[in-house]
Image (cartoon, rainbow, N blue to C red):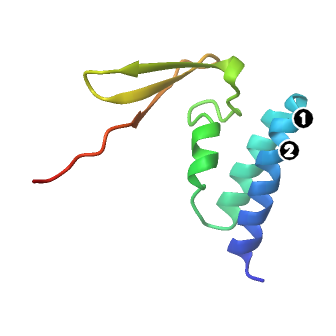
Amino acid sequence: MNLKTLAKERIAVLLKEAELVPEKKDRYAELILKIAKKAEMGLPKSAKMKICRKCKKFIMPDSLIIRTNKKTKCVEYTCKKCGSKRRYSYSSKKNN
């Protein structure tokens, strides 16, 4: 078993545990980032959406503001702890 597959498995376990044990969610976010850095790999998309880039804390629904923007066709996530914003597109562009 190589390091990257082991890291992916461990990250998946920590993501599940963070949702079950909210008291330790910030510590688990730190561990996820350390594991990904040590394995020299990027975070999976599920982890990227749950960890704030600026404050490095685990984002739960109580620490997040979600807004939709019809003009830019994206969903905007705002972290209540540090105020950083992330945008995710919800429209698919078709080339004709």
Which percent across, then down, holds residue 64?
61, 20
* Left or right of residue 22: residue 48: left
Task: Give the image location of residue 33, x and y in percent.
Answer: 69, 50
**In percent of the image, x 73 and y 81: which residue is there?**
2
The answer to whether 31 appears left or right of 56 in the picture is: right
Secondary structure under the numbered disc 1 in the rendered image: loop
Dividing the picture into quadrants, the one containing residue 19 is: top right
Residue 38: assigned label = none
Q: Gap between marks 1 and 2, in whole Å? A: 6 Å
Query: Mark number for residue 21?
Result: 1
Residue 88 is situated, as x and y percent measured from the top left of the image, at 42, 36
34 or 24: nearer the viewer = 24
Image point 35% across, 20% down: which residue?
Answer: 69
Measured along the vertical axis of the image, is residue 43 above or below residue 79?
below
Judging by the rendered image, the residue that carries numbered circle 2 is: 17
Category of crowding for the residue at label 2, using alpha-carbon neighbours closer than 10 angstroms: few (below 14), some (14–19), many (at least 20)? some
Instruction: State how many labels appear.
Output: 2
From what the image shows, is residue 77 above or below residue 24? above
Name the image quarter holding residue 68: top left
Of residues 25 and 38, the one nearer the viewer is 25
Question: Identity of the amino acid at label 2?
Answer: Glu
In the rendered image, the vertical position of residue 34 relative to residue 76, given as above or below: below
Q: Amino acid at mark 1?
A: Val
Screen quadrant of the N terminus: bottom right
**Position of residue 50 measured from the top left corner of the image (x, y, whole percent):** 64, 38
Q: Nearer the viewer, residue 33 or 45?
A: 45
Looking at the picture, does residue 47 appear above or below residue 51? below
Q: Are marks 1 and 2 in contact (CB under 8 Å)?
A: yes
- Residue found at x 20% / y 50%: 94
Q: Residue furthest left?
A: 96
Instruction: Report helix, strand or loop for mark 2.
Output: helix
Where is the C terminus found, in terms of image quarters? bottom left
